[in-house]
Amino acid sequence: MTNQQSAAHPAQQPAAGPDAKFQEFLGQGEFRIQQCASCQRHIFYPRVLCPHCGSTQLNWRQASGDGSVHACSVVMGKPGTQTDYAVVLVDLKEGARMMSHVVDCDPHAVHIGMPLRARIVQREGGPLVVFAPSVPGEATP
């Protein structure tokens, strides 16, 4: 891909498959994850078969949006620019784990076990799931 092509398409969306379906749901304002019809476990990232039992019987379910920080790292921006942000692994209430980042709080105050609530935001490349503290006043900037 040339520089000209990448500038015209900063973040291409998947054309087909489970990733495309996930992005379609996000575009409709719905945060959905897959659940295996055979073993009943929830799955994230979107896949074509269950990583737990191998079944291809995966259904899309509305996620609760609730989760907690499993692990966290703060990405440091240029000093003095207030651009630091927290990258997190979130344990969703349904049992799946996903990577995202935390908004609406001081990234240095994010901690393991912190309760979070998902929301969908629009970014340059399309819709994205981010998380914010679900306890009022927790990790206030």
Image: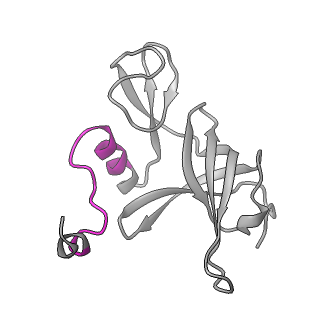
* Residue in front for this viewpoint, 57 or 14: 14
Q: Give the range drawn in magenta.
A: 7-25
Report the colour scheme: one colour
Q: Is residue 72 above or below residue 55?
A: below
Total numbered badges shown on the rendered structure:
0
User: Which quadrant of the structure image shows residue 122?
Assistant: bottom left
**Quadrant the C terminus occupies:** bottom right
User: Which quadrant of the structure image shows residue 132?
Assistant: bottom right
Name the residue: 60% across, 30% down. Answer: 95
Position in image of residue 43 (x %, y %): 48, 31
Position in image of residue 102 (x %, y %): 63, 60
Position in image of residue 60 (x %, y %): 40, 33
Position in image of residue 96 (x %, y %): 56, 33
Name the residue: 42% across, 68% down. Answer: 123
Q: Does the magenta stretch include residue 31?
A: no
* Residue in front for this viewpoint, 70 or 139: 70
**Quadrant the N terminus occupies:** bottom left
Whether residue 127 sits left or right of residue 131 in the image: it is left
Whether residue 42 sits left or right of residue 16 in the image: it is right
User: Which quadrant of the structure image shows residue 54?
Assistant: top left
Q: Which residue, as the protein is rendered here, is positioned at the far bottom?
A: 80
Name the residue: 26% across, 50% down. Answer: 14
Whether residue 47 sits left or right of residue 99 in the image: it is left
Q: In this view, does 111 lie above or below 18?
A: below
Q: Which residue, as the protein is rendered here, is positioned at the far right?
A: 137
Q: In this view, does 93 lie above or below 36?
A: below
Q: Is residue 15 magenta?
A: yes
Name the residue: 76% across, 50% down. Answer: 114
